[in-house]
Amino acid sequence: MNYIRKHGKEWKRKPRVVAGEELQDVTVLVFGKPRTAIFAHIDTTGFTVRYQDQLVPIGSPEVESGMKLRGEDSLGPVECRLKVDEGQLYYEFGRGIDTGTSLTFSPNFRLTKEYVESPYLDNRLGVYSALRVAETLEDGVIVFSTYEEHGGGSVPFVLNYLMKRYPVKQVLISDITWVTEGVEHGKGVVISQRDRNIPRRLFLDRIFAAASASGIPFQVEVEGGGSSDGREVQMSPYAIDWCFVGAPESNVHSPNEKVSLHDVKSMIDMYQYLMKAL
């Protein structure tokens, strides 16, 4: 919200900002007469302190003994280390940490001429891309959603809100995907044909036709697992098409997530193009 207040006055069109208890922790930006919505989740993976130094994962973080974690409880800041013992997760710290405290990977931001490396590029880069698109967006909706990393939950009530007031027909998922044997660093943004869920073929054809006409480098992803906010869009009672469009990363859900700067640029460029073309 601070970023939007500070930079929103420089954007081509001033959006209506929707936030508050009606949408819990979700923030929605509405520009002009929207046809398409961008969904970018703002939650992260991490850990919850249980009992007797135990940790319970939030979402699916990568785990390895010695990883640095941080948080804050009633006694103050916490900087501790993760311990993995026979498949169970624990923290190592000089005192007990309050039960229920949330811990995340400690910040470790690294930037070179070709790559950015840091914890939580998924989905900070999806949010960054959406904010860059907001600079020139005239018609559209940008939704900063929650709960994506641990099962979903905010998309249904956000869609209900939008369809009553700004009925969009299509959704683009601004998220970060994986480097695999078929998706590489530096080859452009990824447009996903499917993951565990399969978007409608007619809409995919429109996306790929527009992407090809754009001249912006992109890669095609086909996976049988994984999911995103697109799952909840597909399972909603509304006839809304969706597609996942995002840069690929390696070292997923770890303190060393790595993304090509070239792919980040092509992601922003592609979103700017698609929001006008669709």
Image: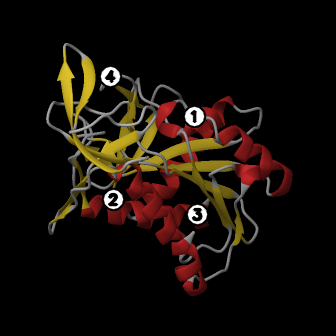
Q: Is residue 278 something one can see in this rendering?
A: yes
Q: Is residue 168 something one can see in this rendering?
A: no
Colouring used for the render: secondary structure
Residue at figure coordinates x 46%, y 34% from the top left: 100
Taking the image as shown, residue 101 lies to the left or right of residue 87, namely: right
According to the picture, the residue beneath numbered tag 2 turns out to be 217
According to the picture, the residue beneath numbered tag 3 turns out to be 275
Please name the amino acid that badge 2 sits on.
Answer: Pro
Which of the two discs, 3 and 4, sits closer to the camera? 4
Please name the amino acid that badge 3 sits on.
Answer: Met
Please name the amino acid that badge 1 sits on.
Answer: Gly
Q: Earlier in the sequence, mark 2 or mark 4?
A: 4
How crowded pointer 4 is (Cα within 10 Å; few <14, some 14-19, many 20+) is rated as few
Residue 91 position in % (x across, y down): 25, 32
According to the picture, the residue beneath numbered tag 1 turns out to be 152
Residue 73 in which image quadrant: top left
Q: Earlier in the sequence, mark 4 or mark 1?
A: 4
Distance of label 1 from label 2 (alpha carbons): 30 Å
Q: Earlier in the sequence, mark 1 or mark 2?
A: 1
Residues under numbered marks 3 and 4 in contact, where contact means CB atoms less than 8 Å apart? no
